[in-house]
Image (spheres, grey):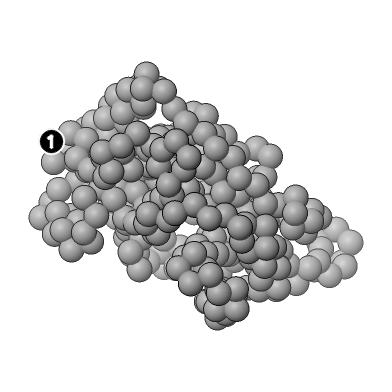
Amino acid sequence: MTDPGVLKTLRDSGVTIYDNSMISLFLRCPRAFYLRHQRGLVPADKTGNSLALLMGLYVHKALEEWYTNRDDTKAIKVFSELFGPHEGQPTISTKTGKELSATYTVLFGCSLLSAYFEKYRDDNRKIVTLETPLAEEISPEVYLAGRIDKIVQGPRCLVFVDYKTTKYINDFQINPNPQFMTYKHLTQQLTGEPVSGELDLLGVSKTKTTHELLRREPFDYSEWQMENWIQSTREHINNINRYIDRNIWPQTWKCTQYYKDCFYRPLCTLPSPDAYERLIETKYVEDYWDPFQLD
């Protein structure tokens, strides 16, 4: 299923739709899942917290433009205009007092994209689709959603491609990877054909060359692995739905990830419930997660 209108109608009619990000957050902390996805809460001031996500989003937009028209200038312009208002600014080191240059800048992003275009300009694989939102029913009235960056015709089979802009260049886990397994399942349901995957990595680092930051890595999963994945995914979703029915959301006390505090840590440090809703009103706003990211 790919039609955004149908997908929105399903969601509005009460059909449950999950994606890998939602399931992963539930597994990390049910309380955080409740606050993010049941109440739709995000910090009112997100300044500085989403630069990595914004760069990734706008790199995706630039690559979509480039693979559509193969025009370097237009693709660079797309990235520059979208990311420019948000780019990182120099900061002062608390240890040395010296100025530290920002990592997430328009200059870095444009340099990375230019190197990408040069490196992969001769990739002549046929592009089947770009930026395709998909959802399939994996149990009654429960849909699993994802957005496939690119599907190409490989030498043996169709290949779904996932772009990753990340600082964790050498620590990215491909096997097992529930997000990629989701994409394999959705792509096979869409095409009716066996498919494999490809990680298209665009690393983020001030100390490595752009050549070091670009890497493509093919991968695949066996039928047995996929059976284990879908069984596990269904069970995780069943657990989410049980928590929803009971309205009980335990904490796991995993307050730090990627060296940053959980957005909801202030709510977990309150000594009494009296100020809970008041803190939510002052520190958070509603912005519900869109599994399809259609905007």
Q: Position of residue 117 (x, y in %)?
A: 63, 64
In the picture, the quarter occupied by the C terminus is bottom left
Residue 54 visible, this angle: no
Percent coordinates x, y for residue 259 in the rendering: 64, 47
**Res 177 seen here:** yes
Q: Residues within 10 Å of mark 1 (few under 14, many from 20)?
A: few
Dot 1: element: loop
**Quadrant assignment, res 143:** top left
> Residue visible at 44% across and 27% down?
221
* Residue at the image position 42 percent from the left and 56 percent from the top: 127
- The x and y percentages for residue 219 are 52, 34
Expressed as whole percent of the image width and height from the top left, the position of residue 43 reads 45, 63
Compared across the picture, whether 237 is left or right of 285 comes to left
Query: Does 238 sit above or below residue 88?
Result: above
Horizontal relation, residue 140 to residue 103: left or right: left
The one nearer the camera, 183 or 55, is: 183
Residue at position x 53%, y 55% from top?
A: 124
**Left or right: where does residue 39 sit relative to residue 58?**
left
Vertical placement of residue 263 versus 253, above or below = below
Query: Can you tell which quarter of the image residue 180 is in?
Result: top left
Question: Which residue is tagged 1?
Answer: 140
Q: Nearer the viewer, residue 120 or 116?
A: 120
In this rendering, the answer to whether 290 lies above or below 74 is: above
Q: Residue at x 33, y 43 (%)?
A: 187
Q: Amino acid at mark 1?
A: Pro
